[in-house]
Amino acid sequence: MLFDPARITILDGATGTELMKRGMPAGACPETWILEHPDAIRELQRAYAAAGSSCVYAPTFGANRERLRAHGLKTDVRALCRELVDITRSAVPDGFPVGGDISSTALQLFPFGSATFDDLIDIFTEQAEALCEAGVDFFAIETQMSLAEARAALIAVRSVSDKPALVSLACGDTGRTIMGTDITAALLSLQALGADACGVNCCSDLDVLARLIENMRPYAKVPLVAKPNAGKPDMSSASAVYRLSPEDFAAAGVRYASLGAACLGGCCGTTPEHIAALARACEGVAPRPLPAQPKLAAASQTRVVDIGGDTEFADAEINDDLAESMAEAMAEGADILRLRVRDEDDIECIDDCQYALTLPLSVSFEAPELRAKFERVYHGFALYE
C-alpha cells in the first residue's frame, strides 16, 4: 500500500541533478538521453530503492508531446513512456511500486498564452494513457506551476485510471507558485477533484515549506506531500551546487512529519544519501492523523476564505462586467462572490475572466447538469448552494 496510515511514505529523490552528475549535458532532453544511457537511471533508482524509498518515479517527467516538441522531437509518446517504465522496472525488485511521472507542458493558458484548458487535458490524457499501458502503479503529477495545469493533468489521469494520484506543485520563497497559485487553494481544489495525496515539491526554503504544510493541514482530507530541494542552491559556479547535508535534510523531514506531512522525499540536489538519512530518521514514525473535521473554506486560485458566521457575501450578475463587479465587491469588503449560473454561456464567461476573479465563488445553478461543466473549468474551490 503506497499510503500506509501506520508509516511515513518515503518518496525518491532528485533525478535531473543526479543524471547531470552521471554525464547528462545541460539542455539535453532527459527522456531521450536516458534511452541512450539506461544504466545511469538504473543505478540511480536501485540506489533509491536500497536507501529506503517506498517507491520510485519512472523518468517520464517531460514525456508529453509539447515538452518533446520543445526539444525538436516528434517522438511517439506511447513508445517512449513504455520504454522508460520498462527501464525503471528492470532497476527495482519485482512488485516495487513505480510511478508515472507527469510534469508541466510549459504551455501558457489564455490569457497568458494561446493554449486552452482542453488542449492541456488532451496532451496529458495522451501521456496518462501511455503510462497506464506501460503498467505504472500510481501517478505522480509534480512540479506544477499553476493550479490550472495541475487540474488538467489530474482530470486527464482520472479519465483513464483510478490508480493513486499524487499531485505536488513547485513553489518559491513566497510560498506560491510562479503563477501565483496559493498552495492551500490548490489542496482544496485538487483533493475535491480526486487527488490521493497533495503538496509541494521543488521548494528551496525549508522554513517556507514547513509553514505551507502547517497551513494546509487544517483543510486536508488526503495525505500531504513534502519533497523539497536540498536547500538553496549556491549559484556562484557554472552549475547549481546544493550543500544541505543528508542529516539536516532528514531533520527537516521529521519536522514536516510532525506538522502533518505523510509523504516525504527529495527534489533538486537530493541524493540517495539524503533519502537514506530521511528513511532512517522516519523509521517508526507514524503519520499525524488527518483532521477529523477539516475546515470549511472556499478558494480562488490565489485566496482562501474560511466560512463562518462573519463571512461577507456579495451578489453579482454573470456578464461582461463580471470582473468589474468582483472588484467593486472586494472594495466593499466582500469575502465571497455569489453567482447564479443560468446556462453554458455563463460558464464560458466565468472561464474567460476567472484569472481576474480573485475572490472565491459561491455558485447556484438553473439546471443540475451545469454543475459538472462548471467544476471542470473553474480552477478554484467553490461553495455550492
Image (cartoon, rainbow, N blue to C red):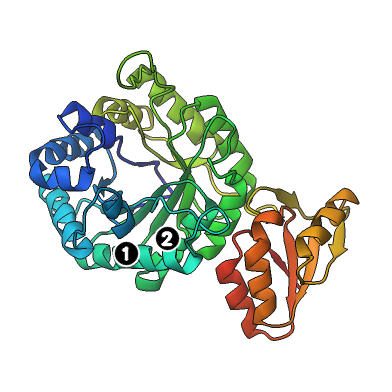
Residue 267 lies, in percent from the top left, at 36, 35
| Crowd band around label 2 with a 10 angstrom C-alpha radius: few (<14), some (14–19), many (20+) | many
Q: CA distance from mark 2 to mark 1?
A: 8 Å
Q: Is residue 67 left or right of residue 150?
A: left
Q: Nearer the viewer, residue 304 or 273?
A: 304
Name the side, left or right, on which 19 lies relative to 54.
left
Above/below status of 9 relative to 257: below
Residue sitting at 68 percent across and 68 percent down? 350
| Badge 2 vs badge 1, beta-carbon distance below 8 Å | yes
| Residue that numbered label 2 is attached to | 153
- Mark 2 residue type: Ala
Q: Residue at x 43, y 66 (%)?
A: 119
> Mark 1 highlights which residue?
128
Q: Residue furthest top?
A: 236
| Residue 82 seen from this side | yes
The quadrant the C terminus occupies is bottom right
Q: Position of residue 121 (x, y in %)?
A: 42, 66
Q: Nearer the viewer, residue 13 or 75?
A: 75
Name which residue type carries label 1.
Ala
Badge 2 marks a residue whose secondary structure is helix
Q: Residues within 10 Å of mark 1 (few under 14, many from 20)?
A: many
In which image quadrant can residue 251 be found?
A: top left
Circle 1: element type: helix
Residue 187 x %, y %: 56, 51
- Mark count: 2
Q: Residue at x 69, y 52 (%)?
A: 295
Q: Is 158 drawn above or below residue 92 in the view shown?
A: below
